[in-house]
Image: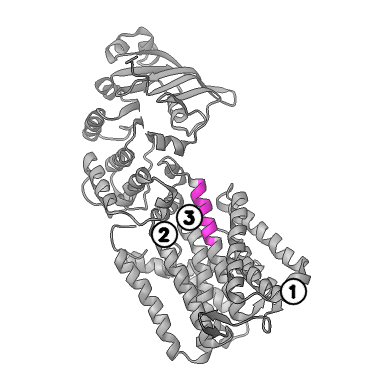
Amino acid sequence: MAAIGPLLQTEALHKAFGGLQAVQGVDLRVDPGEIRAIIGPNGAGKTTLVGMISGRVRPTSGRVLFDGRDITAAPAHARVALGIVSTFQLTNIYGNLSVYANVALAVQRRRLRSAFDILRPDDPLLAGEVQSALEEVGLPTAWDLPAGVLPHGHQRLLEMAMALALRPQLLILDEPTQGLDPDESAALTALIRRIADRVTVLLVEHNLEVVLGLSHRITVMDRGSIIAEGTPGEIEANPDVQRVYLGQ
Amino acid sequence: MTRGNGRRALVLHLAVLLALLILQVFLPPFHHGMVARIMVLATYAIGYNLLLGYAGLMSLGHAMFFATGVYGAGLMVYHLDLGPAAAFLVGIAASTLVAAAVGLLTLRTTGVAFLIVTMMFAQVFYLSTLLFSRITGGDQGLVLTGHLQPLRLGGLKLALADPGVKYNVALATLAACLLVNLWLVRSPAGRVLVAIRENEERTRMLGYNTAAYRLLALIASGAIAGTAGAVYALLFSYVGSTFASILYSIYPLLWVLLGGAGTTVGPLIGAGLMAYIVDAASGLTSSYLLVVGLALVVLVMKFPAGLAGALRARWWRWLP
């Protein structure tokens, strides 16, 4: 009876866009504490799959279970409250708002307890939490600048700070190192490793070096289905994976 | 949207209100009446700005909410001889309900579609006021003089037609709405509205039910517009379908754009400036609307973010 159930489970998850079968019958199981990577060639259905987990995409059929609860019908914003938080393939921040306001939006969401809280003035603890979220990702202190003027690498870190400020249980990172130079990419990888002791991470990533160095287990998708799953060592040795993903 | 600065903003708003309070002693009668009218219209603009400037939704149907306040209060006085305080409350309640109902239907859309749909609803409302002219007085309107009882405040009896009473009731309305609006936009909810304006999808993925927040913004906006409408009817003793016409949906848009959308003092600046431009232009020529139009074009070209927006961009970064 001591067995811990999976944090996230999908059952026969299916998504069709018109005639295109983007995701077909995916059964995914992610245990708490894991760093799980999902890899696969372009068009394999990775982003659609994580979209159905975060709630941005409605599945055609199948179920999504989080912490044992069926959340298939839950809207995206409600899933964030449950602890499923995403960052996006294209950096998605509020460019016109200050760095501080970007993170404050995430912090205040987590602190909302009742409907009346939305009309209360900011409590002093908010600023402290914004500060610690920004310090955690290592952002320098130009907090009054509009977030849009930050260099790309810092915008990524800001997005991480927003995600972490929500204190997620499951953090979905869609191509977090895209567009980063090697140094920035290494710093972000180190950050992900650092937070992994308290957050389960689901990582969609193209950069194989990052994936192999970071993840505990890897799920390989091709044409909407899972074709392999295992440790980084197993995946590297798998002939099917070499064929579809690493090139013939 | 930076840290702190709460006190500075509050002091500025209180100073503006204090200035208006003192101003009445010095204003000659004509300007005294004009500023009273401006303050009520600025309240309307504050309501409009909450939706446009903060939630980022451009409505062309706000005349419906303003006129609901006008009729809600005015018809109670005219037909049922209700006292001004009760009529005022009916006006606010009616406009809040109308905003909630219209919001549930129109907020399925955003952008240009929202603009069009709100305009359609407002046109239906406008045509209804003409159709039921036996109750509303149609475009002739109804004059409330003779039906309107004095406002009782404790032992005091205040005749709303008295210029001094008019000015101070208008000021009290403006003060209440300005400060409520300031508190709203500086609350966590206000920050979420700005976030929705900037990037709705991101806001949803931060865990906010954006549809609910937009509805909240529309209801608050409609309620403030209706408050202004109710006060307008009571102070100026008149209700008429003009207030429901498209013109009264366009006015607040112009005031807010001129004064600065998304700033708390912009609506007051815009409504005041526009009233005086119209006044100055109509003294010069009979085709004063041409002058007004040109003035607007120049101002918008020079200050695309509105006057208060320009102030914020150049000097007062803390301006809420």
Q: Which mark is residue B69?
A: none
Q: Is mark 1 on a helix, strand or loop?
A: loop
Q: Do labels 2 and 3 share a chain?
A: yes
Chain under callout 3: B
Q: Give the range drawn in magenta.
A: B211-221
Residue B43 on the magenta span = no
Chain under callout 1: B
Chain under callout 2: B
Residue B35 visible, this orientation: no
Q: Residues within 10 Å of mark 1 (few under 14, many from 20)?
A: some
The residue at which mark 1 appears reads as B137
Left or right of residue A149: residue A13: right
Q: In this view, does B140 lie above or below A137?
A: below
The number of numbered discs placed on residues in the rendered structure image is 3
Q: In this view, does B121 lie above or below B227?
A: above
Residue A81 placement: quadrant = top left
Q: Which mark is residue B185?
A: 2
Q: Residues within 10 Å of mark 3 (few under 14, many from 20)?
A: many
Distance, label 1 to label 3, CA atoms, is 35 Å
Residue A99 visible, this orientation: yes
> Which of the two discs, 1 and 3, labels the residue nearer the N terminus?
3
- Give the amino acid at mark 1: Gly
Residue B33, image x, y percentages: 53, 85
Q: What element carries label 2?
A: helix
- Give the amino acid at mark 2: Val
Secondary structure, magenta segment, majority class: helix
